[in-house]
Image: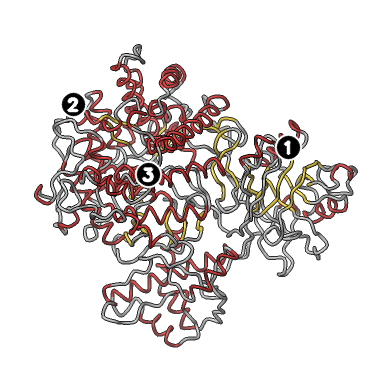
Amino acid sequence: MSEAGGGRGCGSVVPQRAPWSLVATTAALCLVTATSVWTAGAAPMSREEKQKLGNQVLEMFDHAYGNYMEHAYPADELMPLTCRGRVRGQEPSRGDVDDALGKFSLTLIDSLDTLVVLNKTKEFEDAVRKVLSDVNLDNDVVVSVFETNIRVLGGLLGGHSLAIMLREKGEHMQWYSDELLQMATQLGYKLLPAFNTTSGLPYPRINLKFGIRKPEARTGTETDTCTACAGTLILEFAALSRFTGAAVFEEYARKALDFLWEKRQRSSNLVGVTINIHTGDWVRKDSGVGAGIDSYYEYLLKAYVLLGDDSFLERFNTHYDAIMRYISQPPLLLDVHIHKPMLNARTWMDALLAFFPGLQVLKGDIRPAIETHEMLYQVIKKHNFLPEAFTTDFRVHWAQHPLRPEFAESTYFLYKATGDPYYLEVGKTLIENLNKYARVPCGFAAMKDVRTGSHEDRMDSFFLAEMFKYLYLLFADKEDIIFDIEDYIFTTEAHLLPLWLSTTNQSTSKKNTTSEYIELDDSNFDWTCPNTQILFPNDPLYAQSIREPLKNVVDKSCPRGIIRVEESFRSGAKPPLRARDFMATNPEHLEILKKMGAASSVDAEDGLRFMQEMIELSSQQQKEQQLPPRAVQIVSHPFFGRVVLTAGPAQFGLDLAKHKETRGFVASSTPYNGCSELTNPEAVMGKIALIQRGQCMFAEKARNIQNAGAIGGIVIDDNEGSSSDTAPLFQMAGDGKDTDDIRIPMLFLFSKEGSIILDALREYEAVEVLLSDKAKDRDPDMESEEQPFSESDSQNQSTEQLALGPREVGSVDQEPPGESSANAPPESAPAAAADEAAGVSPPEQNSDPLEHHEPTSLDGECTDLDNQLQEQSETEEDSNPNVSWGKKDQPIDSILADWSEDIEAFEMMEKDEL
């Protein structure tokens, strides 16, 4: 792009030293009056309230950081439910999630510059001394190159940046002699062997001690990596080169970015999710702005800011044009196929895309940023947190929430750019939800399921590195921060790198050249500063006018942009056949199916879309056959409802989704296995009995404790160390007999969750719990008065679960070793009630996507909207009427056979991890 096409962005840092506000608040500084315009349209928050909320953020950080240092350090992360450190190899493996852990006190390093931003200089100095004395970077452990770069290398560089700033001020860190930079350099050299590929793309993992491909390294055989994994290195590696003068780091990171750029799909200018590091072939050909790609785009724009290389801006603008052309369907951002960008690759979105409105602010494209941010906020208001994935009609797709900070990040940047106090209220909501639903006595616990409110025993390091930093800065005035935040750029992990690096130790190597640059619509670059358009009309209600149509987008109206109308249908032709509308007995529908994939490229795209929707309908039906998870909430002192455990349901007994929750004190049964008449009926009378799994049927245990007078039962797994963190929950089946005589609720806890209740019972004697379908709100007054909390109305829950890594999407479609799950409803044929040692039977999978489907709104088209909304508000479940698909005819079989490759491709896309 020529400079006349829009010129440098506000983030230009070459050659003079430009403040970070020229980057972080692109829109605001492009139009100096923006803040006053926004403020006029909304009631400002008082200085006192902002200070109060800022102090609340400080207290929350102290609670999280203090518990990590007291109960977990020097482990990598805190396990806030069991109040101990997570050490790699000492806890059950969580798969790729654990690749972030390297036995290098991850949370401490990731929190270094947060301490300075929060004006905790004494704690920062102590933390730096601990890192220098205790942290070992030479461990025999295989770690993610991506995670180690953004968290550890970035954390060390961010800590070094602020350490030298404090040293220059003359009050703190006078003893500091660049030791953190020396550690960062050591780590940088340990990561370099990962780049030993023909393409220059790094291996996804490396052994800190032995490197790559040696027998003792236990890594180096991988062939694929995600685009973000290879494209999110340039800021940290270039900063390391600029700090040290060793150009090799910046050169390797540039080469990886160059290769990704060359491998983009030339007709769409999009990149895929996963690429072969040796051949450069795209393994996953879907493209979006969420998991697997997200920070690649972020680092192109920020590399231009930090390094002053115009080619990075040209590349970003080229990609951004493609994103807005194909992926952006305001307010949604939906993945597409790189070769067929008019074809959506899925009908759900993942939580990591919440960073994108913030990036659009840096770009200066405010309107779509406001729209997407508002849509995400409405989802949060519905579920308290942003689910890891949600559908285009805003149902929960994956229910986990590991306390991700991306939405807070975008909220901060939108406020900085606009000055609109609305975003302060959004931040206030985030604070309230964290304290109300995620806070536990030993820190903050991730949400296992946003629908039930159950917790997961994890507090990722990025929670301290990013969440508290952005929330504090949101409410802080300039005088509240001890240094000028505008002199720094944020990495994707919110670590701070000084902008003066742009003119320090510049590489003598040739700058990037953007080959085969394609002329784009100039209007795309009008939003790059110096701006050729007015970002905000002279209307104090402009932002509100953008947000208002989206206020009820989740609950009361169809989201705009969900249905993509192809250009070929503008002439008035019939819209494409959707899977949910298909009837096997309709001759017209069968004729349409026959044409798909044969008549034209448009028909081929319709066929691919139709098959994708059919597969998702089938998957949805299988998920909806399962009973949803339940919640065990400890409500007595000192927990007060703050600890919520994920529990498996039973196919017999009281259904907690249809009846009021059960509340009572717990007591261990004797015998503990509950397989015979209880010898301590007086102990369990009127209480919730704790019984151990094994030696007899679940239903037999339930009858024995019910006969003893128990009001409920909790079965605790006898497999020591089992946990819902590493194994999907299953349902307790009956015994093949009539179980209508069982009238009490029965729930199942894995060993780890059960031990939390048992430990509490040993320590506090009287432990009261609540068995429910969804955790109840905690009463803030309850903690001071030590009285039972007030219960709010419960909401019925949906039926899906999720396991996601720190930056990755994962699958939970597996069963724990030796276990299987049962999901046949009680009114169906008797479930295969195997002995408890064998668990419960797996759900019967219906592999035919055309039989017995309930139509599911996959792309937001609304029919009979008022009736649907009324049902949804009452049940929180899908509001579509049952439709019998009938028997499929032979012609459909032949058509499906022709599409077998497409079906396999879509199934692989659904199962693959991003």
Q: Quadrant of residue 703?
A: bottom right
Dot 2 crowding, Cα within 10 Å, few <14, some 14–19, many 20+: some
Kindly identify which numbered label has been placed on residue 298.
Answer: none
Counting from the top left corner in percent of width and height, residue 912 is at 44, 54
Q: Nearer the viewer, mark 3 or mark 2?
A: 3
Element type where label 3 sits in the image: loop
Could you tell me how far apart the alpha carbons at marks 3 and 2 are, in whole angstroms?
A: 44 Å
**Cβ–Cβ below 8 Å for labels 1 and 2?**
no
What kind of element bears circle 1?
A: helix
Residue 205 in percent (x, y) is at 40, 38
For the point 18% across and 30% down, which residue is it? 17
Question: Is residue 694 placed above or below 250 in the rendered structure?
Answer: below
Report the side of 50 relative to 259 (left or right): right
Question: Is 201 on the left or on the right of 462, as rendered?
Answer: left
Q: Which of the two residues, 804 or 211, is positioned nearer the viewer here?
A: 804
Q: Earlier in the sequence, mark 1 or mark 3?
A: 3
Q: Is residue 81 visible?
A: yes
Counting residues from the N terminus, which is met first, the one under dot 3 or under dot 2? 3
Question: Badge 1 is on which residue?
Answer: 758
Q: Earlier in the sequence, mark 1 or mark 2?
A: 2
Eyeballing the image, is 501 above or below 345? above
Label 3 is placed on what type of residue? Pro
Find the distance from the CA under tag 1 to the CA under tag 3: 49 Å
- Badge 2 marks a residue whose secondary structure is loop
Which residue is identified by label 2? 505
Farthest residue to the bottom: give it: 587
Amino acid type at circle 2 is: Asn
Q: Amino acid at mark 1?
A: Leu
Q: Nearest the camera: 599 or 423?
A: 423
